[in-house]
Amino acid sequence: MKKDREEMLGKYDVKKLLIKLSVPAVLGMVVNALYNFVDTLFVAQGAGEIAIGGLALAFPIQMIAIAFSLMIGIGGASVFSRAFGRRDYKKMDHAVNSALRVGFVGALAIAVLGTIYIDELLIFFGATSSNIGFAKDYLSIVLIGLVFTSLNMILNNLTRAEGRPNIAMVSMMIGTGLNIILDPIFIFNFGFGLGVQGAAIATVISQIAAFGYIFTQALTKKSSLNINFKGGLLVDFQTVKETIAVGFPTFLRNSLGAFLAIVIYRLINQYAEGDPAIYISIYGVINRVVMFIFLPGFGVVQGLVPIVGFNYGAQNFDRLKLAIKLATKFIALYFVGGFIFIQLFSKYIFTIFSEDHNLLFINYGSQAFRIMSFGFLLVGFQIVVSSIFQALGYPLRAMLIALSRQILFFIPIAYLLTRYMGIDGIWIAFATADILSGLISIILLVYAIKGIGKIEMQSYKPTNEIIQEVI
């Protein structure tokens, strides 16, 4: 099976290979995105618009946990893919087992600390008396299942890296499908009638089921993921360093997303006219729908990453360049389509999230979303370029893209514009930051394609060089 996947990643027609690896990831992401969308919709219908704000306030700590899991998963997958290309099976085993063990310990620590300091965290995030109860009800339960969620995400990335995207897709579909079935049962009065708590319980049960499936698949003889239970929590520290170094831009990007949410909530609390809770709920809807649009794009990138990592490790630079060009064109066109969708249907989106047809929620929310969506015109370049650099083992360049959008552009622009324009400035700042960082990504992409195979004619960058680059 290993040789079959080596043959597929190294010799199969690039366009067909990208489609073969991307379609399962895209389908899985679409299902996952549908879960986020439907989950929020059920909460809105079962508990009202303000409850959406409660979920939004739980978002920062969830994003920190997700950021950690993706750092380990994507970093470990990059190490695994490049080792796979070199046929370094010992390194492959180190990448898998170290990732799972570090992921377990890290997720457990976040869950414990989050539970102990839940009130302080939510108040720090910007919770008010109107929505803190919803946020606490949801977050306290989600933290219980955090370890399973984290390990599921790590295994999902490793499974794609070994060339088994269908397994990763099915795992995501199990988690999402089960959650959509359980949500109404736990949320609405015809079932258990638990409201926001019911949404959290459904999420935890679904993540445990998804983890159970992908974990058992990783233990079969068909898998190249050689999971070893004998080592306990022992890890290969050199591999862990490389995993963290390569995955750190992902952690930075997603944890900055949590920090960004806190900044947004505080700006809303400061500049909103009337109760800020309704505006936080508006941002909660926008954030969920943006995830719905973005996740299929991430699916294409996840199909691209094993091709990039393997062919870089095998020095197949022509295949590497072709795969990058094909994926970039598709993702750019996809996000232009996302922009058109939001311009046409944003009002309808907010209408279906409003149980009592709140005009402020619908009219202002749709206006804000249309402004924000202008950034979609270039946002795809950030996603694909950052992932390419991670797959190649260049964390510093990937980190630059993550920093440019959220730190260099969004935060200063948002503080400046809200001072003169109120909370309208938040949505304009989003669009501006996406456009500027997209332009930077295009420049870096052109430079990277020209440099591949000319400047770096080596199949493997040693761990100490990767660590040096990140330092």
Image: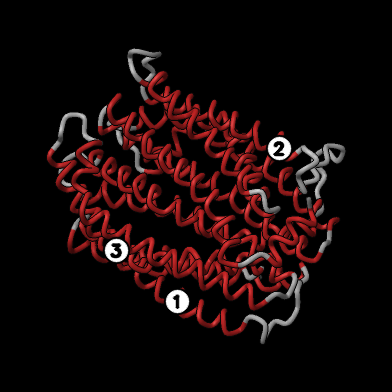
- Asked if one can make out residue 151 in the rendered structure from this viewpoint, the answer is yes
The answer for how far apart the CA atoms under marks 3 and 1 are is: 20 Å
Query: In this figure, which residue is indicated by the disc labeled 1?
Result: 442
Under circle 1, the secondary element is helix
Mark 3 or 1: the one toward you: 1
Mark 2 or 1: the one toward you: 2
Under circle 3, the secondary element is helix
First along the sequence among labels 3 and 1: 3
Rendered image quadrant of residue 246: bottom right
As rendered, which of 285 and 22 lies closer to the eye? 22
Residue at figure coordinates x 54%, y 83% from the top left: 447
Label 3 environment density (alpha carbons within 10 Å; few <14, some 14–19, many ≥20): many
Query: In this figure, which residue is indicated by the disc labeled 3?
Result: 429
Query: In this figure, which residue is indicated by the disc labeled 2?
Result: 217
Q: Where is residue 10 in the image (x, y as percent from the top left)?
A: 71, 66
Residue at figure coordinates x 26%, y 49% from the top left: 268
Identify residue type, mark 3: Ala
Residue sitting farthest toward the left: 359
